[in-house]
Every structure is written in C-alpha cells, then in structure tokens.
Image (cartoon, helix red, strand yellow):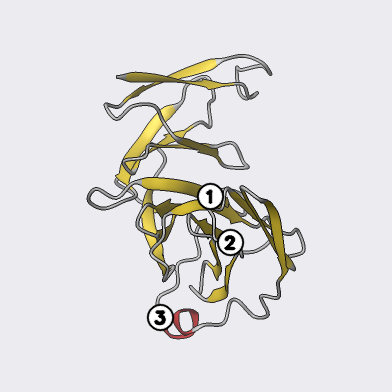
Amino acid sequence: QTTMLDFMRGAEKVSWGDRVEIPLERSVGAARFVRITDLGNQLSVCWTDGTLARFSIRRMSEPVEVESVDLTEGDVRLTAVGVLLGGSTLIAGTSDGQVSGWFVVPDEDNEVDGTRFVNAHRFELGSGSEVTAIAGTSRERVFVVGTRTGHVDSFYMTSGKRLASLRTKRKSAITACAVSPKTDALVVADAGGLVSWEFDPRYPEAGFRSLFGKVWSGR
C-alpha cells in the first residue's frame, strides 16, 4: 500500500502553497503521526505498529528517506508521539504504558545525512496504562504524559527524573496535555473538560542518571 504525504510548506524550489508528495511504501496502512522539526530539515512519519520513517527535507522539492526504525517491541502499539524543544527529540508512548525518547546522533555510515535515530531514554509510568497524549516544552527538556486511565506524569528527559505523578478525579482518558510556557503549570484535557495543576520542576537536571550515568543530550 502506498500512502501519499502532502506538504504545504515553503522551501527551496517550493513556494508557499505548493504541494510536494512523498510516496510511503508501507504495508501497515495509513500513517498515524507526522512531525517536522522547527528548522524544517527533518520529517518523521510514524505508524501504529511502531514503524518510523525519517526523511531529510533540506531540499523540500526532493525529500529523501534517511532510515526506518522500530519505536516499539513485539505487538505493542504506538499510541502517542510528542516532541521537545525544536522537535529534534521525539517522545514515543505505547499501548502498554512505555515511554521512550529518541533523537539523532552522528553516524558516518549513513550517506544521506550522516546521522541515525537512537533510543536514548526509557521511562516507566508505573500505571501500565496506555499512553494517550504527550507534550513537550518549548524552553526546557520537560515533558508531560497522559494515559487512558487519567494518570498524568511529568519527566525531565536528560536526567530521567520524574517531576510529577498525578491523576484526574474522573480517571478517564487524557486526550491532550500541555506544559505552560513558564513551566509552572500542567494542563490536561479529558471528556469532561480541562484540569490544571500548579507545577514546580525545581532542579530537574539533577538526578542519579545525570550525575553518575551516561547522559544523552541530543543533537
């Protein structure tokens, strides 16, 4: 099956409003998640079976597939995708409550753009509930995760530190979530409306992993 992905963004040899189609040769149905970095140089297309196809779109008129990786293991489904900062770090959530952080690292063997995607961080939610929403911040490496059972967790990507563990009174599926621009509040949405909490990450970069372990900071 071929999925056609349409771009409506300006770039080299492509004017605003022009359409660039990328044929995605996959046999797992339509793509579920699409993310573009703020710099507009990388595109990630994800399917629910965990497949991610990464494209270099430095030349928008001539996108090139860089690599294909699996964000999940076994029969686990990919259920939510978020990004951090400029979009260079991708956060993947799964049907069994697992969360992982991915970004590019240098790879001389990759002749397309000299990088490869790696799974640098894993996070345990504890609830084991399906991840339904993920949101990162625009200023820090803080992100928030919502689940089907109303659990809300916040982490710091680099240190792996859990910053908050909450649950809505309705205990229903979180459909969207966000961290405030000043990183002082968490906001989630469910079928009943919006819920917010005051939030103080304090010193999120300090943790056992960041002080004594190997730290991936991204590109």
Identify whether 23 is placed above or below 185: above
Whichever of callouts 3 and 1 sits on the residue coming sooner in the sequence is 1
Give the camera-side residue of 192 and 196.
Answer: 192
Q: Are marks 2 and 1 in contact (CB under 8 Å)?
A: yes
Q: Is residue 136 above or below residue 78?
A: below
The Cα atoms of the two marked residues, 3 and 1, are separated by 25 Å
- The image position of residue 175, as x and y in percent, is 57, 48
Res. 195 visible in picture:
yes
Crowding at mark 3 (Cα within 10 Å: few <14, some 14-19, many 20+): few
- Residue 89 in sight: no
- The circle on residue 213 is 3
Q: Residue furthest right?
A: 182
Question: Pointer 1: residues within 10 angstroms few (<14), some, or many (20+)?
Answer: many
Q: Element under label 2?
A: strand
**Numbered mark located on residue 82 in the image:** 1
Q: List the residue tagged with mark 2.
A: 143
Query: Mark 3, mark 1: which one is toward the viewer?
Result: 1
Task: Identify residue type, mark 3.
Answer: Gly
The residue lying at 37 percent from left, 37 percent from top is 47
Does residue 196 sit above or below 116 in this rendering?
below
Q: Quadrant of the N terminus?
A: top left
Query: Contact, CB < 8 Å: mark 3 with mark 1?
Result: no
Q: Which mark is residue 178?
A: none
At label 2, which amino acid type do we have?
Phe
| Left or right: 202 as drawn, with respect to 7 | right
